[in-house]
Amino acid sequence: MPNAAPTNAFAATALIAEDEPLLAAALQAELARLWPGLQIVAVVGDGLSAASQALALRPQLLFLDIRMPGASGLEAAQALAEDWPEGVPFPLLVFVTAYDQYALAAFDAQAVDYLVKPVDTPRLAACVARLQQRLADRAPATGTLAPPAGPGGTGGALAADPLMQQTLDQLRALLGGAALAAAPAPAARLAVIQAGVGNLVHLVPVAEVLYFEAADKYLRVVTAEREHLIRLSLRDLLPQLDAQQFWQVHRSLVVRATAITTALRDESGKVYLQLRGRPERLTASRLYAHLFKGI
Amino acid sequence: MPSVTTSTAPANPAQADDTSVWRGFLRRGLRNQVVCVVIALVFWLMTTGGRGNLFTGWIYSAAIGTCCWFFIDGGRLLISARLPAGQRPAGARRAGWPGPGWMLVCIVVGTALGYSLGSAIGDHFTGFVTPSLLSNRPAIAISLVTAIAATWYFYATERLRQEQAAAEAARRDAAESQLRLLQSQLEPHMLFNTLANLRVLITLDPPRAQAMLDRIINYLRATLGASRTDQHPLAVEFARLDDYLALMSLRMGPRLQVQLDLPDALRGLPVPPLLLQPLVENSIRHGLEPKVAGGRIEVRARQQGDRLLLSVRDTGVGLDRPVAGAEPADTATSRYGTGHVAERLATLYGSRAQFSLRPAADDEGGTLAEVSLPMPANASASEPASTSASTPPPACPPTDHA
């Protein structure tokens, strides 16, 4: 039974992520005019704060500028999708971009909500109406009934929520496309990694690496015997790796597929990986859990 | 009746394409036939006064002419195909041209062979006996002279044709690359974000909106290359940078601090237009925009002895973006796309100008780009009436955009 069209008094919370202060203020003012019931819980200017504030404040809506310092709007959305807690509905995302032919085509293809800067009032009003309707439709869905466990035994409200799955699929497609667009012409396959410590340089064959983990500005290169640190971002490393051999399982983790012995699913949708030759357990996020499905 | 004939030996430097080489070969062969007919006619008229046998004359002309052409043209194509690359004259287009030395050999040998074979063929058809070439000096002389003359003529016309084609292609390339440069300079992202900010200012602060609009207009004029001067005063260069940085200040707010430092004495010095613009854009785009806290950009001009030093310094994220296996040396310039600036300096000043891009030396971090030019002669002390609408910044000391 569809809900009646919500009025502008409809209460909701939102977070705005926009690095240009005038534009952030303007969006906030316009939204206040069009949707008085909307409460802006935070206005941030970079992608890292967007993710951390959204996790802390748990708004129902996110307006994410695509180009921001620190992390882009897409990367912030990825971080949220991976770290979002169980039991709380995932926010509705609206991406905002000034001009990006690639992004607009991708957004259209994925049926993702977006706004083009400068944002004019009719378009913002239409967006507001769509968001209100979606929130209203979703309202009875969160809640009392635990959804039935799926055939793979995945329980967990968030994992089985079809809206969440749709969002995850959309994000995966956008991130994959963005990586392709950003990567330069295929770099040569990396065969040896040079990890320097003072005057000594370790030459680590990529064939021996079990996984790469991003840690601040560095990258941990982990083999069976030891680990090394190199100054490189995962984004710069990925195009140089063979995607068949090395799987990205988290925004900060890339694992050699043949090094994984078992993958254990958890109710929250996360997957725990056991490795050959290393005691620690790695966690694959829900964004990449689809890689590990039983046959 | 044997007639002295000539050989036409067109020696068109052929195109590199193989099929077109053979097509050219056949084309010349056909033209050769036409010339043979003409030569037969001329000899018929000149030697027999129109009373001799034109047909016989033509047979000899055609036979000898065709054989000579075949040997000379074919010979040169074969020789030039087999020449090792080092011996072939420069210019890949001139495939088929074996060089003047070998060409002469082709002409002499080809004429001799062609005359002998052609005469034999003619004799076969007419029943006459032609004296051999070696005993017929006039025949040798005329044949050789004609062959050389024809070769020269065809060579010259072909070369002219090729050079015209090359000039046309170069003009086309230049137009295309200029178009591409303009398209890349306009940067829609910058444009739309700036317009979005302007839109907000219109109701928020109308006078400031108008000032911003003026700057946008100046920026667009400069970017779209409306002024075609080779040089403009350093003051105008700084005015253009001021426009751009004012727009970026509006967009980045407190994240951008700007310092422009142009001493009075240097204001009139002529410099190439938009020399520093790419460096400033790089500082913002690669250095300050990605930095969450933002930072400062300083553009300075100063004189050091007989050199003019222009520097752009930012306190942004810096150049340090190493790649796992690759050399760090070449990533700096390639990532920043400053190769274009270095090229431009080399074109305009040769080795007298230097350009460097390196991490800033002090502990604030960031990047320093420096251009060192020979001190230009001071064009004029006065301000230019100039092509741009805005006036250069009125004072010399650092202008700060808060």
Image (cartoon, coloured by chain):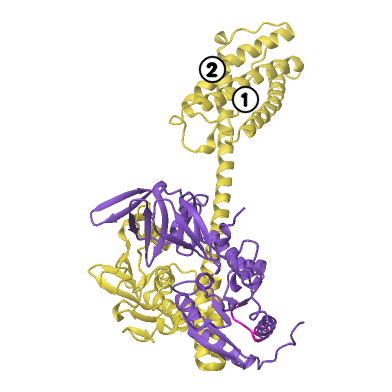
Q: Amino acid at mark 1?
A: Thr
Q: Is residue B389 visible?
A: no
Residue under the image location 55 percent in, 21 percent down: B144
In this rendering, the count of numbered labels is 2
Helix, strand or loop status at disc 2: helix
> Which quadrant would residue B342 be assigned to in this image?
bottom left
How many neighbours does mark 1 have within 10 angstroms: few (below 14), some (14-19), or many (20 or more)? many
Q: Which chain is purple?
A: A
- Residue B89 in percent (x, y) is at 46, 33
Query: Who is closer to the viewer here, A135 or B198?
Result: A135
Q: Is residue A174 visible?
A: yes
- What residue is shown at x 44% (from left), y 84% (from top)? B253
Asked if residue A243 lies left or right of residue A6, the reply is: left
Does dot 1 land on a helix, a strand or a loop? loop
Please, which chain is the residue tagged with disc 1 on? B
Which of discs 1 and 2 lies nearer the camera? The answer is 2
Q: Give the position of the N terminus of chain B as an image quadrant.
A: top right
Establish if A87 lies above or below A171.
Answer: below
Specify few, some or many for label 2: CA neighbours under 10 Å numbering under 14, 14-19, or 20 or more. some
Pointers 1 and 2 within a single chain: yes
Determine the CA span between mark 1 and mark 2: 14 Å
Give the quadrant of the C terminus of chain B. bottom left
Query: Label 2, on which residue?
Result: B109
Where is residue B124? Give x, y as percent. Answer: 71, 7
User: Which residue bears the numbered disc 1?
Assistant: B8
Q: Is residue A216 magenta?
A: no
Write down the colour of chain B.
yellow
Part of the protein shown in magenta: A116-124
Q: Is residue B159 left or right of residue B371?
A: right
